[in-house]
Amino acid sequence: MRHLISGVTFNQSAMIREILEYPDPRLREVAKPVAEVTPEIQALVDDMAETMYAAPGCGLAATQLGIPHRIFVVDCAAEDEPSQLLAFINPEFIEKDGVQTWEEGCLSFPGVTEEIKRAERVKIRALDRNGKSFEIEADGLLAVALQHENDHLDGVLMIDKLSALKKRMMGRKLAKAKQDDARE
Ligand code: K1U
Ligand code: ZN
């Protein structure tokens, strides 16, 4: 599959990698900043995009592949829109305001969704796949995805945002989703 990041055509030999599932301890690692955007980092970004599209999801953090680098990819375009793939290397939020609640999924918690409260609007700075600094402002689903992915880089998972009761319910939903999956 071919996608575009900042006008650069993706590597066609990108690989689909395995996505770690909760409670894998590697999901709790705090990722380290990328020192330099090398061809190896670009190949990892390409693999992450390929893995995200294959899942399918609208975001994926390197932590979910067991790679503790501060990198994530997102594409929140609707199915009938052209893809809007963005790669974020060493992302930092510069602004956050407002509150919104979204029914979130997570590729590391297959089969479950939960309502999570997050900032409504964000401004984020990062390096792109070419190592060039950029800033974007986002609201709605993209703002949620950016916050969800950045949490992965800090080892924070959506289950951490729930009350004790909802955590227990999520544990049961996960067990049931796993059972249903094994039966299929
Ligand atoms: O990080 C992840 O686990 C991926 C996750 C990120 C996310 C984006 C936006 C809101 C909440 C969480 C997802 O991609 S959940 C959405 C999803 O599974 C999906 C999206 C589009 C098509 C098919 C599935
Ligand atoms: Zn997730």
Image: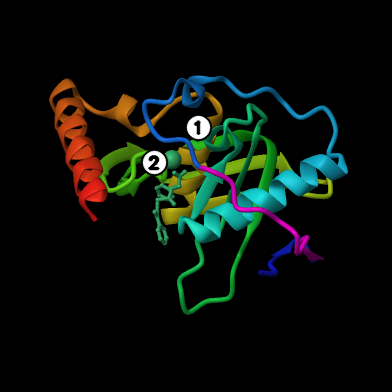
The amino acid marked with disc number 1 is His
Structural crowding at the residue carrying mark 1, measured as other residues with C-alpha within 10 Å and reported as few (<14), some (14–19) or many (≥20): many
Where disc 1 sits, the SS reads helix
Quadrant assignment, res 168 = top left
Q: Main secondary structure of the magenta part?
A: loop
The residue segment tinted magenta is 8-18
Placement of the C terminus among the 4 image quadrants: bottom left
Instruction: Residue 82: give x, y in percent of width and height.
Output: 58, 75
Instruction: Residue 12: give x, y in percent of width and height.
Output: 75, 64
Marking on residue 98: 2
The tag earlier along the polypeptide, 2 or 1, is 2
- Nearest the viewer among 178 and 141 is 178
Count of marks overlaid on the render: 2
**Residue 78, magenta (yes or no):** no
The reply, left or right, for residue 138 in relation to residue 167 is: right
Q: Residue furthest front?
A: 183
Quadrant assignment, res 31 = top right
Marking on residue 183: none
Name the residue tied to disc 1: 152
Instruction: Residue 25: give x, y in percent of width and height.
Output: 45, 20
Instruction: Residue 161: give x, y in percent of width and height.
Output: 31, 28
- Rendering quadrant holding ligand 2: top left
The amino acid marked with disc number 2 is Gly
Label 1 beta carbon less than 8 Å to ligand 2: yes
In the rendered image, the vertical position of residue 45 relative to residue 68, given as above or below: below
The answer, for residue 128, to whether it is visible in the render is: no
- Render colour scheme: rainbow
Are the residues at dot 2 and dot 1 in contact (C-beta closer than 8 Å)?
A: no
Label 2, label 1: how many angstroms apart (C-alpha)?
21 Å
Q: Which residue is at 70% across, 69% downward?
A: 2
